[in-house]
Amino acid sequence: MPKTARLDLRLDPEHKALIERAARVSGASVSEFVVAQALEASRRVLAEHQRVEQIQVTEAAFERLVAELERPARVVPALLEELKKAER
């Protein structure tokens, strides 16, 4: 597929120099290096996002969760004490 889309950005001279050095060390052009790194990071972020969105539980586990959420709240003395300490 021909590369016709552009991505322009502004960055600090120090960041540009760092990217240029990393590209040179890796044997890639700056464009190749930036695209490769951006694609890798994008895939990683989207995979993590998808993983979080797809948390699945069994029906029994879901029913237990709902039952626990519907129960009246109860005071946990140790937790109450820790909250009091934190407020001081």
Image (cartoon, rainbow, N blue to C red):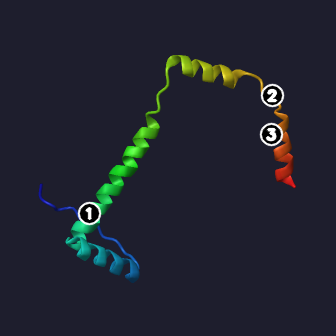
Query: Mark 1 is on which residue type?
Result: Val
How many discs appear?
A: 3
- Of circles 2 and 3, the one toward us is 3
Residue located beneath label 1 in the image: 35
State the CA–CA distance, disc 1 to disc 3: 49 Å
Give the SS element for disc 1: helix
Residue 28: which quarter of the image? bottom left
The residue at 85%/35% (across/down) is: 77
**How packed is label 1: few (under 14 Cα within 10 Å), some, or many (20 or more)?**
few
Query: Mark 3 is on which residue type?
Result: Leu
The residue at 45%/37% (across/down) is: 53
Kindly identify which numbered label has been placed on residue 74: 2
Q: Is residue 61 above or below residue 13?
A: above
Horizontally, residue 51 falls left or right of residue 31, namely right
Name which of mark 2 and mark 3 comes first in the sequence: 2
- Residue 31, position in %: x, y? 23, 70
Query: Mark 2 is on which residue type?
Result: Arg
Horizontally, residue 70 falls left or right of residue 65, namely right
Give the SS element for disc 3: helix
Quarter of the image where the C terminus is located: bottom right
- Of circles 1 and 2, the one toward us is 2
- Residue 84, position in %: x, y? 86, 47
The residue at 46%/39% (across/down) is: 52
Instruction: Report if the CB atoms under discs 1 and 2 are less than 8 Å apart.
Output: no
